[in-house]
Image (spheres, rainbow, N blue to C red):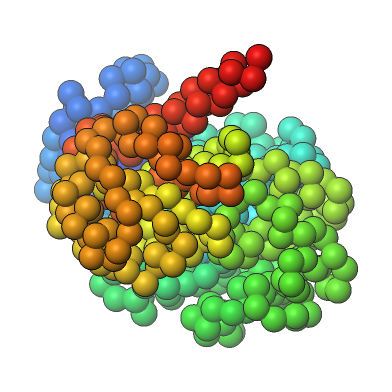
Amino acid sequence: MFENQKILILGFARSGYEAAKVLVGRGNKVILNDSKEESKLEQDKIVELRSLGVELVFGSHPDDLLDSSFDYLIKNPGVPIHHKYVLKARELGIEVLNEVEMAYRLFPEGVRLIGITGTNGKTTTTSLTYEIVKKAYGEKAFLAGNIGYPLSSILNDLKSGDIVVMEVSCQQLANLSTFRPNIAVMTNLSPAHIDFFGSYEIYKKVKARLFQNQTSDDVAILNVENEDVLDETKHIQATKKFFSSENSINGCYLDGKDIYYYGKKVLSRDDIRIAGIHNVENVMAAVMVAKELNISDSIILDVVRNFKGVEHRLEYVDTICGRKFYNDTEATNTKCTQIALSSFDDDIILILGGLERGQDFYDLADYLDHVKCVVAIGECRNRVVDFAKVMQKDVYSYEHLVDAFKKCYEVSVPGDVILLSPASASWDQYKECEIRGTEFKNCVKELKNKVESNKN
C-alpha cells in the first residue's frame, strides 16, 4: 500500500512533513503544497524534503496542480473540509485521507491502538494514560496524535506487541475510514469547533467516528454523565464500559474521596495532584484503559501520584510554605478560567489579564466564591481592576507578571492557591502563552530557592 503512486499532500506543518518522508521513502511521487510562502516555513525541513525528492509548491494553491493523475490527496487535519482541492479530489474520484489514516494503514500487525478524544480533557487523559502504559510496558509504549507527535513519525519504530496511545482531534477524525482503535475513549462532548464543521450536530457525529470501525472485540470507554456522549454512541458495536464522577456504577466511579473500579478501590482523590473534578474524570478514563491492559494498581497509583498534568494547562507547579502554585497560562479565554476557578475549594489569589481583545471578565462573576484577591496584569489590566472592584474583591495592578507574582506571595497565607489563569491571550508581551507560563514557573522556582536559602 502507498507504493509507486502519485500523492498530493495538502499542508506542511508537522503531519505533512512526516507524511511526506514516509511516502517518498516508499517509492511514491510526492508533491507537497502549502499556501504559506517558503520563507515563512522551517528551512531545515524544506531542505530535507527536497533532498529526498519531494516536490514542494509554496505560496498558493494553483488551480491546475491537482488532476486525475493523482492516486491520493492527503490533507493536514487543519485544512478546511471544503477546501477546493478536497472538493475537486472527490469529483475526480481521488481518495481524500489525512496523515492519521495514511499512517494507520501502514501499521505492522499486532500493534495495539488506544484512541482518545473528547471536547475537553483529551490531552491530559492521553498524557496520563501514556505515562501509565510506559511505566508498565517500557519501550513498547508510544505516544502519538494531536498531542504533538504525528502518527507517521513513529511508524518506522513500531513492531508487533507495541502499544500506541493517541490523542485524536475532531479534525483528524473528519477524514478517517479504516482507523480502528482497540480501545477508544470519549471524555466528554460540548459545543466546539462550530466554525470548522458548521454545526454542533456535525461536530458530535465526527467525534463519534472514533468508534465507527470497532467491533465487539474492541472496547469503548465512555463518560456516563455526559448525555451527548451516550446519545452519539448508542449504536456502536464496541463493548461499552463507563466511568462516573457522580454515581456509583458498574464501572469506574468516584465514591466520596475514593475511586473504585468495579467495586474495588484503586486510589484516592488525594492521590491526584491535578486539580478539579474534570481531572478526576480524566484519571478514571486512564485507569480504565490501564485495567484493559492488565496494569497493576501499584503502577497506576505510582504514576498518578507523580503526574503534574499537561504543561501550562492547570499545571501543578509546586507547594512553597503552604502555598500551592498552578500554571494555567493556556486559559486564554474566560471559559477556561471558569473551569480553573471551579477546580479549587481553597482560597485563590488569581492572576488575571493580558492582551486586550474585548474579553468579558464578567463571565467569571459566578466563579469567584473562592477568589480572595485578584492581581491584574497586561494590556487589559485596568479593565480587570474595574471588574474586581465591582465584584468587591481586593485587587492589585501590575504591567508585568514578575511584579505581580511578588505581590501574590506577599498577600498570600499558607493554604492559599496562587493561580495564573489569565482569561487572556499573551501577545501583548509574549510571542506565545507558553512563554508566559514558563516565566511563572521560573518565578516559583526562584521563590523556592530563596526560601530554602533563607532556611540555611
In this view of the protein, can residue 162 be seen by the observer? no
Tell me: residue 167, above or below residue 14: below
Q: Residue at x 64, y 31 (%)?
A: 157
Q: What residue sits 78% from the left and 50% below the top?
A: 300
Q: How many discs appear?
A: 0
Residue 309 placement (x, y as % from top left) = 57, 46
Q: Position of residue 233 (x, y in %)?
A: 56, 79
Picture coordinates of residue 302, whole percent (x, y): 79, 44
At x 66% / y 14%, what residue is drawn? 456
Foreground of the two, 135 or 104: 135
Residue 264 is left or right of residue 422, and the answer is: right
Q: Position of residue 220 (x, y in %)?
A: 66, 70
Left or right placement of residue 131 versus residue 405 in this view? right
- Location of residue 430 (image quadrant): top left
Residue 43 can be seen in this image: yes
Query: Which residue is painted at 65% across and 73% down in the image?
Result: 245
120 is higher (above) or lower (below) than 228: above
Residue 419 to residue 59: above or below: below
> In the picture shown, does residue 451 fall above or below 287?
above
